[in-house]
Image: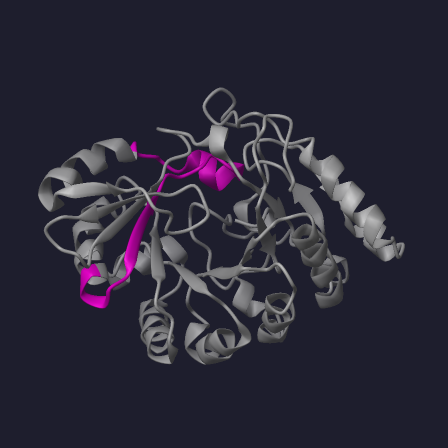
Amino acid sequence: MLVDDFGRTIDYLRISVTDRCDLRCNYCIPKGYHDFESHENWLTFDELTRVVSAFARLGTRHFRLTGGEPLLRKNFPILVKQLSQIDGVDDLSITTNGTQLANQADALYRAGVNRLNVSLDSIRRECVEKITGSDCLDQVLNGLKIAKDVGFKRIRINMVPIPGQNLQDIEHMIQFCIQHDFILCLIEVMPMGNTGQQTKNIDLQFILKDLEKKYALLPIHEPIGNGPARYWQSAKNVHFKLGLITPLSRHFCETCNRVRLSVDGTLYMCLGQNNKMALQPLLRANCSDAELENAICQAIKLKPKSHEFIEKPCQINRIMAATGG
């Protein structure tokens, strides 16, 4: 097993397969941003397979494919199938904005994806367009419907509540998730890059207090996912499960079990720190499996004790899409 210097077992790798996205959510990618990684610097499918295989041999069991928007990567279901067949990959999930889901849901399900997280910050068309810069609500809703139809059981909706934009939509999103048996996960904005740093954040603990009373929420102690979200189940409605990801109001650094691989093969140890290690040079120098595993072990030693989002809110200039979500 991979264990960092603070005794945390690292059993979860988030993998960016592209830093490109077809949306421009106003808390993620800045308008007019063009500083994307060139395609020749993207890890190939074979290189990604080597990295995942190495992590799996070292005891990592949970893998999430992210972006940017991962479904924009050409022949993406082929990569999913390659990774799902690796010995030791017990859990393979995807985070997507849902715009391409209608066309790929069936292929992804058959390729071995276990779980889907879909980013959706409102079900009001004008709000979605304002946040994403695109009139994409119908595409996302259609993608969600088809994902359910092809067999995905545990679909989580990721919502970023933003003052002045969509706070009033939380109740509508709850009802939407109850109706379709989705899990709703509320996420605090992280101050990454200019967009994240300029977006107003809200302490989700205050929202939780109101929802606990209204829906008689009780903590769920058995794990639903493998990330940092804490979950609650409604005692009034068994179809409502709520998750919270609170990196600012109640951080979870002491139990952090994950690292991130960017599209260019850089391992990032923390969203809120700059600790990193480049794996691409090793891979393109035809390193041995032992050399790759040793580099990963050395990278884990760089994992910091905690982020510094509150102490140093302007420290991280990477956009989320460049880090792997």
Name which quarter of the figure residue 294 lies in.
Answer: top right
How many numbered callouts? 0
Image x and y of residue 131, in percent: 36, 53
Magenta region, residue range: 178-203
Picture colour scheme: one colour
Query: Is 241 or 43 nearer to us in this picture?
Result: 241
Asked if residue 187 is among those painted magenta in the image, a careful observer would answer yes
Query: Is 319 or 238 nearer to us in this picture?
Result: 238
In the displayed image of the protein, which residue is found farthest to the top? 311
Image x and y of residue 207, in percent: 21, 37
User: 71 above or below 10?
Assistant: below
Left/right placement of residue 293 relative to residue 109 reads right
Image x and y of residue 104, in percent: 48, 77
Quarter placement of the N terminus: top right
Q: Look at the image and tell me whether residue 305 can be seen.
A: yes
Left/right placement of residue 171 relative to residue 264 reads left
Identity of the residue drawn at 27% across and 56% down: 122
Identity of the residue drawn at 29% across and 56% down: 183
User: 160 above or below 180?
Assistant: above
Query: Is 245 or 165 nearer to us in this picture?
Result: 245
Name which quarter of the figure residue 37 lies in.
Answer: bottom right
Identity of the residue drawn at 71% across and 67% down: 45
Asked if residue 198 is among those painted magenta in the image, a careful observer would answer yes
Image x and y of residue 259, in percent: 60, 42
User: 18 above or below 308?
Assistant: below
Name which quarter of the figure residue 200 lies in.
Answer: top left
Q: Look at the image and tell me whether residue 281 can be seen.
A: no
